[in-house]
Amino acid sequence: MKLIAEITEVVPAPPQPEVSLTPKSGVTYTDGINGLSDDELDEIAETISAASATVTNATEELYCDYGDTHRHISIGDQISYTMDGNSYPFRIMGFNHYDKSDGSGKAGILMQMVDCFNTTQKMTSRATSNAGWHNSDLRTWMNGTMLGYLPSAAQSTIKQVNISTAQDVSTATLSTTVDKLFVPAEVEVFGSATRAEGGTAEGTWYAWYKANNTAANRVKKVNGSANTWWERSPDTWRSHPVRYAAFCSVLDPDKAARSGTDDGMLSVDSTNGVAPCFCI
């Protein structure tokens, strides 16, 4: 009788990704996120999310190790996405900034388009409506048409996050929306709120804007030319007998502006630049 021994090869599990605020000794790190696949970037973001006790929304740089790959990742690092036939660079604005809407913790990486999408958009066509970001035409367009412009692989990595914004121009009461694409609040761009109805309760200063707090670093272009771009904060302006739907925006080159309908200011149903944010 022959005895046949069956040998089962035990394959070791791949090393788990790690993230730290300091580099490992003897390791050579590649700077930035350029060249990473969507899956790799998603894995890094999930690792950052799991390290929320160490990596906060004030963190400016970190080190990620997974297998033979070692990345030094900082706010300001860029990666490009093709949208509607055009390539747009996005930069890292911060880490672990927003809560994921599924309750699984923070979304690891916050991104924003470096400039604006080539097509300007209205915030809403309802110029005398008190509707805020939650009911805006821009939010609907961004989370429908604009999201669809991104490659499907990139779309699958974008997390739904909880976004806080004042309900409208008449109340500071916050409304929470669940969004994949959005524009920042006034406080998230400037670190303070001089016009936003919801004030500083709408968010926290993005780490990149805090570290690069100059007018020049808030300028964004549409098709190569500096352009006013939308924030999602309803504006406190209501001097007119009819409370117009007014939202904050970032003017060329600097300051949050009321979008009203008198004094030559921009109407809410005018078209402005859109610099989308999303989280991975």
Image (spheres, grey):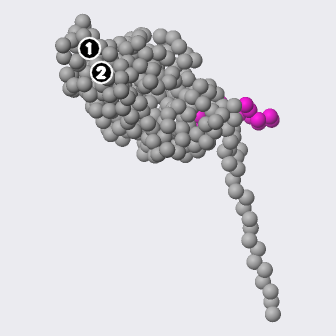
Nearer to the camera, 108 or 85: 108
Helix, strand or loop at label 1? It is loop
**Amino acid type shown at disc 2:** Val
The N terminus is located in which quarter? bottom right
| Residue 231 visible in image | no
Residue under numbered circle 2: 169
Q: Residue at x 28, y 32 (%)?
A: 135
Quarter residue 96 falls in: top right
Describe the element under mark 2 as helix, strand or loop: loop
Q: Position of residue 41 (x, y in %)?
A: 56, 40
Where 269 falls versus 10 (above or below)?
Answer: above
Q: Is residue 145 left or right of residue 279?
A: left
Of label 2 and label 1, which has the lower sequence position?
2
- Residue 176 in percent (x, y) is at 39, 34
Give 23 or 242, whichever is nearer the viewer.
242
Residue 253 on the magenta segment: no
Residue, x 28% and y 21% (percent of image)? Answer: 170
Horizontally, residue 103 falls left or right of residue 150, namely right
Q: How far across and down, in percent of the image, does residue 115 sit?
A: 43, 22
Pointers 2 and 1 in contact (C-beta within 8 Å): yes
- The residue sitting at 60% across, 30% down in the picture is 56
Within 10 angstroms of label 1, few (less than 14), some, or many (20 or more) residues? some
State which region is magenta.
22-36
**Disc number placed over residue 190 in the picture, else none:** none
Residue beneath label 1, please? 238
Q: Residue at x 66, y 45 (%)?
A: 17
Amino acid marked by disc 1: Arg
Quarter of the view holding residue 166: top left
Q: Main secondary structure of the magenta part?
A: loop
